[in-house]
Image (cartoon, helix red, strand yellow):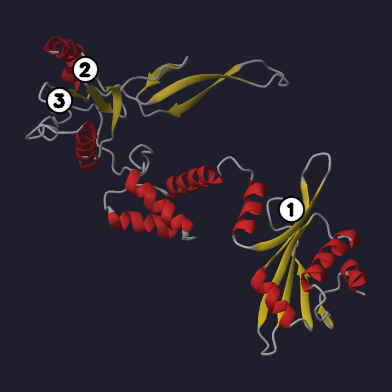
Amino acid sequence: MEDCIAMVQEEVEQEVMSVSILFPDYKNAFTPCRPFPYRESTISWLQMIGRENKFVLVTKHSNVGGIKRRGRVKLACVRSGTYRGMSQRVGKGKVTKIVLKPRNEEEDETRRTQTGIKKCGCPFFINIKKNADSLWYVTVICGRHNHDPAKNLDDHSFAGRLDKGEQEVVVQMTKGNVKPRYIINTLKQRDVTNVSTMQTIYNARQKFRIEDAGGMTQMQQLLHILEKNKWMSWHRKYPDTNVVTDLFWSHLDSIKSLRCFSSVILMDCTYKINRYRMSLLEIVGITSTHLTFSVGFAFISSETHENYVWALKNLRSILDGWHKPDVFVTDRELDLISVIE
């Protein structure tokens, strides 16, 4: 093991000499006073020290070990290594790319575009190994960077990753319909070193929704939720493609309220405010104390006579022979008026 460490030290010696005068050595900061009992705690401590010094450390190589092999982990700066693309480096932090113009242009020439990259060959390197006493020891092979510390870590996607505890907080608050801006405020109050961004919260919420769906499509999820929460629903679909064209739903409590207060009904249709460009028909009732309550909702593919007929038939079915409405209030939607008449 000592031979391997010596070889690595020789490989980075030349790079260290070039930056030893310009940049300080962080070897003492990353050298713990005692070994660690667990691999995860060792990596977490080193990454925490890195964030305190405005550097981001990533796992370069990891081996959990086995019967005859001891575990080991290699940590490096996120800016270690070099760009491996087909283009060539022509300046500090810059790359020259060759981009062909579209064929329909008169001249078939190439143009050069400058794009920045994170990698700059940083020699910082830490080796972690598990000894015979089952403890994890840290050895700083090179404690120098060849770049200045970051002013802030908000632009580093790796530094903004959520740990398991933070992911659980995001999941629980998402279930409680908490807005993303309040979620990220909660995370930063729990940990002042947290540098997660709003995009990190959006990604975590989307991942949770996909896992929670269990492979179901969005329409299957909606129908499942309606059934789970005791909503009565009706839908129509194309027989050839099974694509849902219309959907009507109403809650059991709303149906009870409708059967008690069915004299006046308000109906209005919004105009394609959802991603599927479907109109939402909202049906509202009025109690004897002049309070309103939702009777039901319907997604309809188009505001035509036939769609309104289907929606009002479902409304009549939930009344189930009870007193029919005396007054309908709506805007000047001629197809809806004709159906009501």
Say which quadrant the N terminus sits in: top left
Q: Where is residue 222 in the image (x, y as percent from the top left)?
A: 64, 53
The mark lying in front, picked from 2 and 3, is 3
- Type of amino acid under label 3: Val
Left or right side of 106 for 63: left
Name the residue located 21 percent from the left edge and 13 percent from the top edge.
Answer: 68
Question: For residue 55, what is the image quadrant?
Answer: top left
Residues at marks 3 and 1, CA–CA distance in whole angstroms: 59 Å
Residues at marks 1 and 2, CA–CA distance in whole angstroms: 59 Å
Q: Is mark 3 on a helix, strand or loop?
A: strand
In the rendered image, the residue lying farthest to the left is: 33
Q: Where is residue 148 in the image (x, y as percent from the top left)?
A: 24, 34
Name the residue located 47 percent from the left edge and 26 percent from the top edge.
Answer: 114
Q: What element carries label 2?
A: helix
Name the residue located 23 percent from the left edge and 38 percent from the top edge.
Answer: 44
Out of 200 and 91, give the one closest to the viewer.
Answer: 200
Out of 264 and 260, give the one closest to the viewer.
Answer: 260
Q: Is the residue under label 2 in contact with that under label 1 (CB below 8 Å)?
A: no
Crowd around label 1: few <14 · some 14–19 · many ≥20 (10 Å): few
- Does residue 288 appear anywhere in the picture? yes
Q: Is the residue under label 3 in contact with that under label 2 (CB below 8 Å)?
A: no
Question: For residue 150, what is the image quadrant?
Answer: top left
Per the image, the residue denoted by label 2 is 15
Say which quadrant the C terminus sits in: bottom right
- Type of amino acid under label 1: Arg
Crowd around label 2: few <14 · some 14–19 · many ≥20 (10 Å): some
Q: Position of residue 6 (x, y in %)?
A: 14, 12
Per the image, the residue denoted by label 1 is 277
Sequence-wise, the earlier of marks 3 and 1 is 3
Mark on residue 294? none
Mark on residue 140? 3
The mark lying in front, picked from 1 and 2, is 1
